Amino acid sequence: PASTLHLYKAATAASGLPLEMLRLQSTDEGVDVELGQGPAITFYVAETSGEDHGGTIAVVKEVASDADSAAAMVFHTAVDDTTPAERMRIGSTGNVGIGVTDPDSSLEIFDTSTQLKLSYDATNYSTFGVGATGGLTITTVDPDAAEADLTLDADGKIVVEANAGDEVVFNEGGADVDFRVETADESHLIFAEGSTNRVSIGDNTGSPGATLEVKNHASAGAYGVPLVQLNSNDTDQQ
């Protein structure tokens, strides 16, 4: 044997299925099998003068019914001097949950702080977090520990927070694309045409007729107002 327990079985080409090497089995012999019961492997780690329960891998029942064998694989770990708690589960349909026991999508991560971190290295990374109101905040961090946030609120509001002295850039790749802002009754309130580098303000659904075109329209709030008004709030200027 190469270790304390060494399992060996010759490979076979008869099937593409996994080769069973070890079976853990629990059988209903007339008792009511509860939700969460199933065979498990427990792990103990060395601690001063002994050992402590460090984790468990188990396959457990998902439904509290003796007639339903739907099962999930669960993973428990423990911090120092605590009972192992479930950290991750793979449900019977293949959904994966981290921090949640009933994942309802291919991957669901639950936490009240950052739920996901993607790292290039220790100092270049981005984090993703969903807040109490459902908004998603994406935070980027560079070696200077400078953070910039993009927040997508549940009601559709988008908040961009760049660092002081930096820029907020749209279409940095310089592709030939248009930019349009729509309101309740104007489809092109602000329109920048990428192919001509022209901008229109107002109701202009076609190509702007000048580098800057301002056009009034008989829509809500547009009656009896000037096309352009310049005001100064500087009280030092007379």
Image: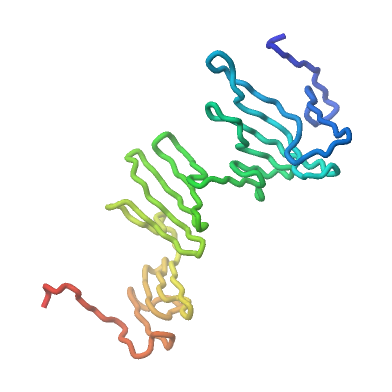
Q: Nearer the viewer, residue 42 or 20?
A: 42
Q: Which x, y percent locates residue 60?
A: 74, 37
Q: Residue furthest bottom?
A: 224
**Residue 212 position (above or below residue 93):** below
Q: Which x, y percent locates residue 7?
A: 76, 16
Residue displayed at 43% across by 81% down: 203
Residue displayed at 41% across by 72% down: 191
The quadrant in which residue 76 appears is top right
Q: Is residue 109 left or right of residue 37?
A: left
Residue displayed at 14% across by 74% down: 235
Q: Residue furthest top?
A: 1
**Residue 21 position (above or below residue 149):** above
Q: Image quadrant for the N terminus? A: top right
Q: Nearer the viewer, residue 158 or 98?
A: 98
Q: Which x, y percent locates residue 81?
A: 54, 26
Q: Is residue 184 left or right of residue 36?
A: left
**Residue 13 position (above or below residue 125):** above
The quadrant in which residue 26 appears is top right
Q: Image quadrant for the C terminus? A: bottom left
